[in-house]
């Protein structure tokens, strides 16, 4: 821990807004369920109205990925996305600050036989997660059934990073920095499951271009590389809030067969196809606020 990251340094006024946010999340985690939904919708609608930059990114993503929708339905999907992600803040607070056991009765978990089969063979699986608004609550709910490590991106704010890491350490066996490839490989070879989300734009050097919703998207090569280095089966995991707004579904799909193939673009396209199909089930719950198409092939104009 550096001097600036010590508990004493966290008393500095620059961290007071972070302490306030952490306190608000702890309180929100214990709100009644209906209150969480109401507050989450309010946060989402406020962001939809006032977060102009994020709304522009979301509108661009929806327009590019759902050209079959008319303008009215695209606008509605944008608004629903902000609402779902607002509720996702309360879901994250719940996943981080409460024992997930109290939500067991709200979970339907399908496809558990796929992971059970892998575990019976003594292997660790590379779990393909997706950046839905329910991401962190999904991790907490998953921990009720199967243990896993999680690959994550450290937060730039050291106080929030400490809070986030401690919270996720209660959910996952171990949290692994996304740059620690050796750590991921070591854990998989030791028979541990690793939760890994390859659906964001990490730039040209780490990626190949592969189709995603009909567009060329910078897609990380690491999924196939990890599978090749470890021999770990790659199992997609789908999770979403159900239409009743009271229950959640987690679902393992069968492990990807003949993966990796040795063709980086084909492997990236295959992972993208699985993720796209999952998103289309509940498109409003995906993190469309992220600049998924930020990196473009040479010669193509920027999209945002």
Image (tube, rainbow, N blue to C red):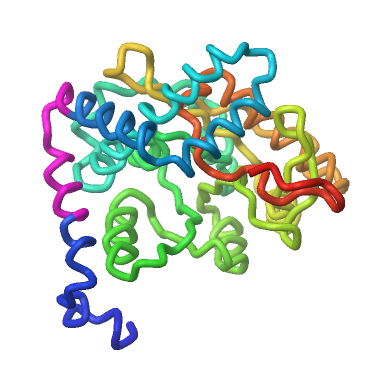
The image quadrant of residue 230 is: bottom right
On the image, the x and y values in percent for residue 148 come to 45, 48
On the image, the x and y values in percent for residue 207 come to 74, 54
On the image, the x and y values in percent for residue 300 come to 82, 46
Observer able to see residue 122: no
Residue nearest the observer in this picture, 8 or 273: 8
265 w.r.t. 9: above or below: above
Residue nearest the observer in this picture, 286 or 189: 286
33 w.r.t. 22: above or below: above
Q: Report the magenta stretch's main SS.
A: helix
Look at 75% across and 62% down and name the residue there: 205
| 29 drawn magenta | yes
Observer able to see residue 269: yes
Residue nearest the observer in this picture, 24 or 50: 50
Look at 38% across and 32% down and name the residue there: 48
Q: Report the span colored magenta.
A: 21-35
Q: Is residue 195 left or right of residue 240?
A: right
For the C terminus, which image quadrant?
Answer: top right
Residue nearest the observer in this picture, 50 or 88: 50
For the N terminus, which image quadrant?
Answer: bottom left
């Amino acid at each position: 821990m550096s001097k600036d990251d010590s508990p004493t340094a966290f008393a500095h006024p620059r961290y007071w807004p972070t302490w306030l946010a952490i306190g608000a999340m702890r309180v929100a985690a214990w709100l009644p369920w209906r209150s969480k939904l109401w507050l989450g919708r309010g946060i989402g609608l406020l962001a939809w109205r006032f977060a102009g930059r994020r709304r522009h990114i979301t509108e661009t993503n929806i327009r590019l990925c759902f050209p079959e929708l008319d303008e009215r339905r695209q606008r509605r999907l944008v608004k629903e996305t902000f609402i779902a992600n607002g509720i996702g803040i309360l879901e994250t607070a719940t996943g981080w600050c409460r024992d997930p056991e109290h939500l067991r009765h709200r979970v339907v978990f399908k496809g558990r036989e796929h992971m059970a089969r892998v575990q019976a063979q003594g292997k660790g699986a590379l779990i393909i997660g997706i950046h839905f608004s329910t991401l962190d609550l999904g991790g907490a709910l998953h921990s009720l059934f199967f243990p896993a490590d999680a690959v994550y991106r450290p937060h730039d704010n050291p106080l929030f990073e400490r809070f986030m890491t401690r919270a996720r350490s209660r959910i996952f066996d171990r949290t692994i920095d996304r740059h620690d490839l050796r750590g991921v490989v070591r854990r998989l070879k030791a028979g541990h499951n690793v939760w890994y989300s390859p659906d964001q734009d990490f730039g040209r050097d780490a990626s190949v271009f592969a189709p995603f919703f009909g567009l060329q998207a910078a897609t990380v090569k690491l999924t196939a590389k990890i599978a090749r280095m470890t021999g770990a089966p790659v199992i997609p995991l789908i999770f979403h809030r159900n239409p009743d707004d009271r229950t959640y579904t987690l679902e393992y799909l069968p492990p990807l067969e003949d993966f990796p193939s040795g063709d980086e673009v084909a492997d990236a396209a295959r992972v993208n196809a699985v993720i796209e199909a999952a998103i289309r089930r509940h498109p409003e719950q995906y993190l469309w606020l992220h600049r998924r198409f930020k990196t473009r092939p040479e010669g193509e104009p920027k999209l945002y």
